[in-house]
């Protein structure tokens, strides 16, 4: 086994949902990890995952150039996991620029930038556009960066399956953009791919990857899959596109279920193009939703009983 104890990887956004799984993989590889976040205390849950001395924490804001440079001091590689639905220009474009510039100037060996499927400077949504512009900045400043574009990500702490399962306790379950297609990816698979890209830039650097799961499913199929896992039986009610479109114009109101930008994002399928490598490039066999989701969605099972079984979903592969 390669001794990587002298390597230090800074993970921006390591305190987030995906971040904990990326850090876990890095710990297993034996590298030292510096978790960079705006509130380091929010990342302390990561500490028990690593031996003493293998993880450190630093306060950093990727929209602040000096903050980024401080977080990367002495690092051999950087991973940028930071994303936002507010201040997207500052986070996705300026922040990506700051990280890539500091990685270049610091002579780092590797940079992994996590973007999103649908990233495109010409996208109608601000999210897709700023993600695309951020990618362009990274490629210009750090040509050997690995750029990973995941589809929707599911896992124990997600705001996707847990939210839908919680909503399913209602008699009626409204589904917006019922025909929009996704290819959800398991967070552990994504975390492993991100870590591998950071650990081996010679193998994975300089390329863009579209990271998705094994099953393509529509929004309504995704809801049906969650209901099958949890045993819940609300009446599924697709929301007409005309009404959802009108509703999105009120997205600026507090508590609104849908923003205008989210609606624009839902006008395009969130699936791989088929033109770029995916998890197979990392030797990772993608995990189906039904094989693992019962582990955390069992608590939603009728009567509070644990589902305790794997589900064989029938969504299109």
Image (spheres, rainbow, N blue to C red):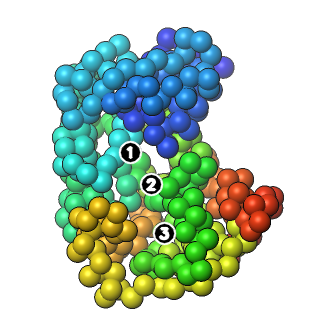
Callout 2 environment at 10 Å: few (<14), some (14 to 19), or many (20+)?
many
Q: Quadrant of the C terminus?
A: bottom right
Q: Secondary structure at mark 3?
A: strand
Q: CA distance from mark 2 to mark 1?
A: 8 Å
Residue 83 x/y as whole percent: 34, 46
Labelled disc at residue 43: none
Identify the residue at image location x=25%, y=39%: 96
> Dots 2 and 1: beta carbons under 8 Å?
yes
Neighbour class for label 1 at 10 Å: few (<14), some, many (≥20)?
many
Quick check: 290 left or right of 144? right
- Residue behind mark 1: 114
Q: What's the distance in space between the residues labelled 2 and 3, CA to CA?
A: 11 Å
Task: Look at 40% across and 25% down and name the residue there.
Answer: 40
Which of the 4 image quarters holds residue 257? bottom left
Ranked by sequence position, the earlier of labels 2 and 1 is 1
Going 51% across and 18% down the picture, which residue do you hit? 55
Which residue is labeled 2 in the image? Answer: 150
Q: Secondary structure at mark 1?
A: strand
x and y percentages locating residue 37 in the rendered image = 37, 30
Q: Which residue is mark 3?
A: 182
Task: Kindly indicate the quadrant of the structure image that contains residue 82.
Answer: top left
Marks 1/3: CA–CA distance: 18 Å
Q: Foreground: 242 or 287?
A: 242
| Quadrant in which residue 150 is drawn | bottom left
Q: At which x and y percent is residue 30?
A: 59, 20
As rendered, which of 99 and 141 lies closer to the eye? 99
Above or below, 221 relative to 123: below
Few, some or many residues within 10 Å of mark 3 (<14, 14–19, 20+): many
Give above or below for 18 relative to 102: below
The image position of residue 102, as x and y in percent, is 24, 25
């Amino acid at each position: 086994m390669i001794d990587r104890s002298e390597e230090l990887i800074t993970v921006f956004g390591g305190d987030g949902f995906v971040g904990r799984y990326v850090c876990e993989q890095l710990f297993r590889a034996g590298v030292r990890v510096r978790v960079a976040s705006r509130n380091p205390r929010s990342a302390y849950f990561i500490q028990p995952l690593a031996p003493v001395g293998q993880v450190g924490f630093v306060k950093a804001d990727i929209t602040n150039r000096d903050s980024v440079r401080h977080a990367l001091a002495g690092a051999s590689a950087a991973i940028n996991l930071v994303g936002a639905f507010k201040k997207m220009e500052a986070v996705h474009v300026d922040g990506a620029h700051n990280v890539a510039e500091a990685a270049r100037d610091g002579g780092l060996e590797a940079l992994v930038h996590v973007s999103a499927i649908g990233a495109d400077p010409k996208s109608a949504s601000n999210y897709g556009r700023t993600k695309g512009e951020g990618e362009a900045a990274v490629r210009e400043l750090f040509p050997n960066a690995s750029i990973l574009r995941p589809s929707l990500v599911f896992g124990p702490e997600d705001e996707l399956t847990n939210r839908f399962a919680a909503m399913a306790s209602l008699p009626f379950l409204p589904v917006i953009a019922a025909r929009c297609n996704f290819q959800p990816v398991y967070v552990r698979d994504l975390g492993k791919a991100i870590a591998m890209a950071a650990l081996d830039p010679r193998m994975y650097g300089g390329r863009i990857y579209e990271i998705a799961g094994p099953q393509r499913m529509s929004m309504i199929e995704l809801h049906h899959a969650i209901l099958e896992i949890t045993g819940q039986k609300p009446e599924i009610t697709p929301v007409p596109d005309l009404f959802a479109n009108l509703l999105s114009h009120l997205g600026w109101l507090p508590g609104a279920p849908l923003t205008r930008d989210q609606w624009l994002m839902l006008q395009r399928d969130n699936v791989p193009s088929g033109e770029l490598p995916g998890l197979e490039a990392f030797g990772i066999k993608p995990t189906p939703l039904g094989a693992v989701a019962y582990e955390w969605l069992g608590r939603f099972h009728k009567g509070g009983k644990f589902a305790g079984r794997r589900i064989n979903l029938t969504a299109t592969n």
